[in-house]
Structures are given as C-alpha cells and as structure tokens.
Amino acid sequence: MNAPVFHEWRNKPLDEVLYECREMLEDTTFPTVRRWREAGGKIIGHFQVYFPEEIVHAAGLLPVKIRGAQVEAIQADSRFGSYLCSILKTSLELALSKRIEMEMFVTHPICDAARNLAAVWGRNFSYPCQILYLPQNANSSHAAVYLRGEYDRLKRAVEEISGQTVGDNALRSSIAVYNENRALLRELYAIKRQTPWLISADEAYALVAIGGVIPREEHNDLLRVVLPMVRERNAKPKDKVRVVFEGGFCEQPPLDLIRAIARSCYVVDDDLLIGMRWILEDVPLEGDPLMNLAEAYIEKSSYSPVQHDLRKPKEKMLLNRIKASGADAAIITAAKMCEPGLEEQVAYTRALDEAGIPYFVGEFEENMTSFDNMEIQLETFVENLLFA
C-alpha cells in the first residue's frame, strides 16, 4: 500500500497530533481499516492478548487488533450468554455490523470464553476463524518447537488468504519493522517512567493503541516524529502520586477513565495493551525466523495472567514493575466478568499487602460511561498518600 491510511497527524504540532490519535482511536467506524480495504488490501483480525503480527505483515496483509469498542452489542448479544466480559460481545459486534470487515479471524485460548470465540465467530461468517494455540506450559523444553509449528500452521493459512508464499526473507524484513516498533514503544515508556509530566497516561495510551489499526511502518513514522516532540515539551512536574496500573492486559478501560486517572496520578508503567510490548528485546534476524519468534515469545517476554510461566510469578513481576518504575502505589483493576483478571487481583493485593505497598482496587468495563464514584475514591486514596 503506497498511500498512508492515517495521514491526519502529519505536519502538525504535538497537541494536534495527540488529538488526531485520540479521535481516530475512538472512531468506531475504523477509518484506517476501511481505507486499507478500499485500496484493495486484505485484513486479518486477531483477538487479545498477543499475536505474531510479523507473519501477517510479511504476507502484505494488515493485522488488526480486535479489542472491542464502545459500541452497543445489538446483534452480538444474542450470540452469547449473559455472564461474559464485554470485549467478546463488542468485538463480534464490530464484525456483524460491518464496522470491520476481514478475510480471517484468529483468537487464542487465553480463557474459556476466548477459546470459544472462534466457534461463535465461525457460525456467523464464511471466512476462516481459527484458534492459535499458544503453549500452556511455557516451561516445557518442547514449548518453542511446538509454538514454531503453530506459527507455521498460521503462516500457511495466511498464505492462502494472500495468495503468495511467505518466505524467510519477508519474515525477517517484517521482524525488523516490529523490532523498531517495540524499541520505540520502550522509549515511550522510558519517558513515562523518567519524566511522566511530559506525557499523560491517556496521551501515551493513544500513541500505543493507534498502532493496532494502522500498518506498523506508519506507526513507526508517527513515533519517530512524536517522541522527540514529547521530550521537548514545556511541562513542569506536579504534585502527583506515581502509580503502576495493572489489569488492562485484555479488555481495555475507556480512554476517559484513563484520562480521569491521569488527573490525579502519574501512571509510570502499566500492562495496557501488553501484547504490543510483549517481546522485550529485539528478535534475532539470523536463523529460522519462526523459531526466533517462538523463542522470543517464551524467553524474552513480559508477564500476564493469560500466560503460565513458573519463572515469572506474576506477583513478583508486579513488585518488580513497581520498583523499576519508582512507583509509590499501584492501581489494581480487572474488567467486569474477567475470570483471569479477577483471580490475579486477589494474588496481587496479597503480595502488595505483604510488601507494604499502597494500592487502589477497581473494576471497569469498556462501555462504562460514568465512573464518578471511582474517580472520587481514587482522589481520596491519592490525597491520603500525599498527606500521610
């Protein structure tokens, strides 16, 4: 694709760039995805949390992160039971209402509901709907070999959609693009940790999230321009509490809720859209690219309630995240009806109690429009910390 699908931000000052990112992100008609299709491009939609987008990118297709939206599940509601997280219903609604059209959909067995999503999706559409089985036991000596096989299976399915073979050189080129993207995101998070007054939590979130609906080359272009502008921003530190936000690994809180948190806190680290930052180091370009991606997923990755790795106990990893970011406290959240998130909330709060770290506990839903009570409670929590 030659013409960019997200051009509105170009040649504008920082505040206007951030505004355009927020506007595009909150537009539930997904203009960037529509522009890609109108130009003749094909789309692979994938559900949260992590997905090896490099494989789809190497085939010349657009990988789109399907993570629900603030829409009413008018059609999708009848396809599901009542007691399920909102993201499943609104994700299917995006497809049923043709807000996002695609050539294939891929989900993962990160929970019982997500594992069944492919079957529900497949009953409503004629295009392929698959499950990518990420290894349940990341500690097995066979995990990387197994995952390499799954990635190869995915590659063959993608080749059928694209009509072309995905060679090792194409994969290496895509890995290089994504390596740069992850490096730029690490730079953004370094700014959040070191000088959080230069960029608010909602601004940083918009800069990250927009990458899920545009080609990664365009995201790299955006970040290359914006990050120096952020560093040069004329902003002074304020008397705010430094916090880590935990609980945004799958369903995402409304942008307005993140903005409300930012009014009283500096969010110096988080697990929001962790799949886009899952791999923590550059993936090697030499050797077998699929094996390199598989090994990176297992050996060079972050932590999440949806991956079971005994080397990365989540409570310890959270405490490490708090320490490394210099946070004063934690905000521990979970999406409504999210079984993995609610289970980890118990373990996290116990670990924080034992470590003597203050924390605030909350629950969210992507479609919530009023969170005045949560904001008032959070402000009280922050005031108690500031004046303790």
Image: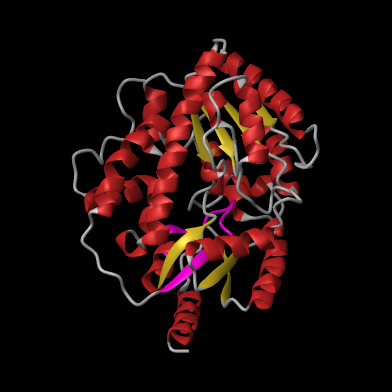
Percent across and percent down for residue 311 are: 73, 50
- Residue closest to the eye, 162 or 181: 181
Residue with the most extreme top position: 164
Tell me which residue sits at (41%, 18%) in the image.
40
Q: Residue at x 69, y 49 (%)?
A: 306
Q: Position of residue 79 (x, y in %)?
A: 67, 44
Asked whether the viewer can see residue 114, the reply is yes
Q: Is residue 355 left or right of residue 230?
A: right
Nearest to the observer: residue 371 or residue 281: 281
For the question of whether residue 335 can be seen, the reply is no
Q: Which residues are magenta?
A: 241-256
Give the residue displayed 43% in from the left and 69% down from the top.
261
How was the colour assigned to the protein in this rendering?
Answer: secondary structure
Quadrant of image for the N terminus: top left
Place residue 167 in its image quadrant.
Answer: top right
Using the image as rendered, state which of residue 245 and residue 126 is in the foreground. Answer: 245
**Total label count?**
0
Asked whether 253 falls inside the magenta stretch, the response is yes
Task: Quadrant for residue 9, please give it.
Answer: top left
Looking at the picture, does residue 165 appear above or below residue 311? above
Q: Is residue 31 above or below residue 16?
A: above
Q: Nearer the viewer, residue 184 or 57?
A: 184
Q: Is residue 13 magenta?
A: no
Q: Quadrant of residue 122?
A: top right
Q: Is residue 74 left or right of residue 13?
A: right
Residue 370 position (above or below residue 148): below
Residue 376 on image: x %, y %: 46, 80
Residue found at x 19% / y 44% = 12
